[in-house]
Image (cartoon, rainbow, N blue to C red):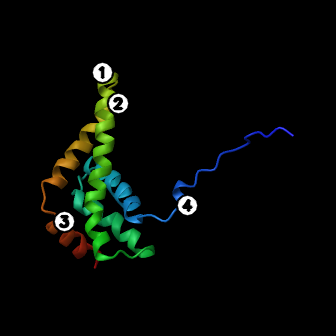
């Protein structure tokens, strides 16, 4: 009998990994949403809000809490860089630039802060 491929299984998310990166992705995108909302929410407050919810199901160790903001920034950098590339390829696509600008603003805000201050602010808002 001839063999045929009838499906593909992707086990990437079934592996043991660092769940704090999932939190960072979610928190980063929420920070953009909160930044563009009315009233504008401080990115650290947005990170804390998502982190507080995450902690109800998956308590974080100190090292993981310290990684939340860098993980969020890393994800936003990937998104903003991809948007910049897409804007270059499609200069008439206003949507790409419209969605990228708030991302760069949140990135600049977060990387302009001392990481110890961000971790301290997150910790105090989780108590």
Which quarter of the figure is the C terminus placed in?
bottom left
Q: Can residue 33 be seen by looking at this rendering?
A: no
Percent x, y of residue 9: 63, 50
Disc 1 residue crowd, few under 14, some 14–19, many 20+, Cα 10 Å: few
Gap in Å between the C-alphas at discs 1 and 4?
39 Å
Question: Of label 1 and label 3, which has the lower sequence position?
Answer: 1
**Residue tagged 4:** 14
| Numbered tag placed on residue 95 in the rendering | 2
Q: At x 41% / y 59%, what residue is drawn? A: 22
Disc 2 residue crowd, few under 14, some 14–19, many 20+, Cα 10 Å: few
Disc 3 residue crowd, few under 14, some 14–19, many 20+, Cα 10 Å: many
Question: Of label 3 and label 2, which has the lower sequence position?
Answer: 2
**Residue tagged 1:** 91
* SS label for mark 3: helix
- Residue 100 sits in which quadrant? top left
- Residue 66 sits in which quadrant? bottom left
Percent x, y of residue 59: 39, 76
- In the rendered structure, the answer to whether residue 51 lies left or right of residue 2 reads left
Percent x, y of residue 65: 29, 70
């Amino acid at each position: 009998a001839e063999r045929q491929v009838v499906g593909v299984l992707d086990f990437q998310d079934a592996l043991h990994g660092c769940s704090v990166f999932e939190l960072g992705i979610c928190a980063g995108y929420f920070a953009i949403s909160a930044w563009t909302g009315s009233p504008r929410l401080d990115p650290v407050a947005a990170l804390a809000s998502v982190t507080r919810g995450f902690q109800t199901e998956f308590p974080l160790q100190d090292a993981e809490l310290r990684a939340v903001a860098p993980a969020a920034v890393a994800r936003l950098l990937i998104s903003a860089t991809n948007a910049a590339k897409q804007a270059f390829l499609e200069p008439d696509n206003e949507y790409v630039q419209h969605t990228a600008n708030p991302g760069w603003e949140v990135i600049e805000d977060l990387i302009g802060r001392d990481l110890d201050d961000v971790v301290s602010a997150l910790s105090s808002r989780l108590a």
